[in-house]
Amino acid sequence: MGKVISFINQKGGVGKTTMAFNAAFALAQSGKKVLTIDLDPQANLTLLFEAKNSVNLHHLLVNSIKELKMIHVPALLSEILHYSKGNVVVDLIPGGQELSGFDLTVASINAPRQLVLKKFLEINGLKDRYDYILIDCPPTLGLLVINALCASDGVIIPFKADDFSHKGLEHFYQVLGDIAEMGIVKAPEVILHVPNLVDLRRKHEQDDLTKIIETVDNNIGEGKVFSPFLNKAGLVKTLSGRKSVFDFKGQEFVDLQGKFLGIAGIIEEWANVRQ
Ligand SMILES: Nc1ncnc2c1ncn2[C@@H]1O[C@H](COP(=O)(O)OP(=O)(O)O)[C@@H](O)[C@H]1O
Ligand SMILES: [Mg+2]
């Protein structure tokens, strides 16, 4: 069975999309079948894949709900699935601005509203078709993200080393606890935290990072924080070219490739003991 992993943080601009995109290509490098899902109405991941679909995840989700199916445009997974070009293949279910209406659309249904995405993955047998399904989450802890958490086996949390992130992290752990308490699904495991856009020359960033690592050690366990990503112009260059770091040559890119392969290795290790 494939594993579902959400890239999550209620804050924007911390690297969720960047990490999900490059981690997907890192896993695909080692021959894994990878599907990415763009759950963000802003659809930045979809932009990176240069996918231009008129129908998107929102339509698929709505169509997977029996009570809503009749009143919405039909949409098939096969029409929507987008394949990357380049050296290795990564699949994408695109997102779109319609997703911002998800909460309202499902407000009246009787089926559990937090399990729509999980049911959708099940109905389509996606965990059998892929080794990994990576979900790029929007910067909220709203119903869409609760759907991602309920559908996920694991989560990866990119963050910036500041005081706000520290508070945000504690809030996020609380949400995981709430999901476990509901008792409907198993809460996802925290696989890794990834400090991003870190400036180690700034003393207060170092202090904030140390504090955050302490919080992670106490709540989740030791060794769950990856080595920091610094602010890398090279990474911006790859993204504006709509490519992963694996499509570039040169030392800066080799270093970045090594880091994303490192994250892929941690994901694989985590998944292997959970088969
Ligand atoms: N390590 C990094 N170095 C330089 N720029 C980065 C780095 N990580 C992310 N960025 C840039 O920061 C912005 C926000 O990243 P993004 O992945 O879109 O965050 P999120 O999905 O959490 O909103 C993007 O423009 C991205 O290119
Ligand atoms: Mg994003």
Image: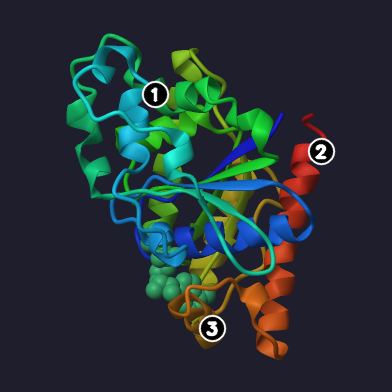
Spatial distance from mark 2 to mark 3, Cα to Cα?
31 Å
Number of numbered discs:
3
**Quarter where residue 60 is shown:** top left
Distance between the alpha carbons at the discs numbered 2 and 1: 27 Å
Give the residue displayed 30% in from the left and 27% down from the top: 62
Badge 1 or badge 3: first in the primary sequence? 1
State which image quarter holds ligand 2.
bottom left
In the rendering, which numbered label is found on residue 53?
none
**Is 69 situated left or right of 172 in this image?**
left
> At x 44% / y 55%, what residue is drawn?
166
Q: Is mark 2 within 8 Å of ligand 1?
A: no
Q: Which percent across, then down, holds residue 226? A: 66, 61
Q: Nearer the viewer, residue 142 or 124?
A: 124
Left or right: residue 25 compared with residue 111: right
Disc 3 under 8 Å from ligand 1? The reply is: yes
Q: Position of residue 90 (x, y in %)?
A: 61, 55
Q: Earlier in the sequence, mark 2 or mark 3?
A: 3
Q: Amino acid at mark 3?
A: Lys
Q: Are marks 2 and 3 in contact (CB under 8 Å)?
A: no
Q: Which residue is mark 3?
A: 232
Determine crowd level at label 2: few under 14, some 14-19, many 20+ residues with C-alpha closer than 10 A. few
**Residue 148 against residue 65 in the figure, above or below:** below
Work out whether 87 lies above or below 81: below
Instruction: Please name the residue that numbered disc 2 is placed on.
Output: 272
Q: Helix, strand or loop at disc 2?
A: helix
Would you say 271 lies left or right of 132 here? right
Quadrant the N terminus occupies: top right
Say which residue label 1 marks: 116
**Residue count near mark 1 (Cα–Cα under 10 Å), binned few <14, some 14–19, many ≥20:** many
Q: What is the three-letter code of the residue carrying label 2?
A: Asn
* Place of residue 112 in the rendered image (x, y in percent of width and height, measured from the top left): 35, 14
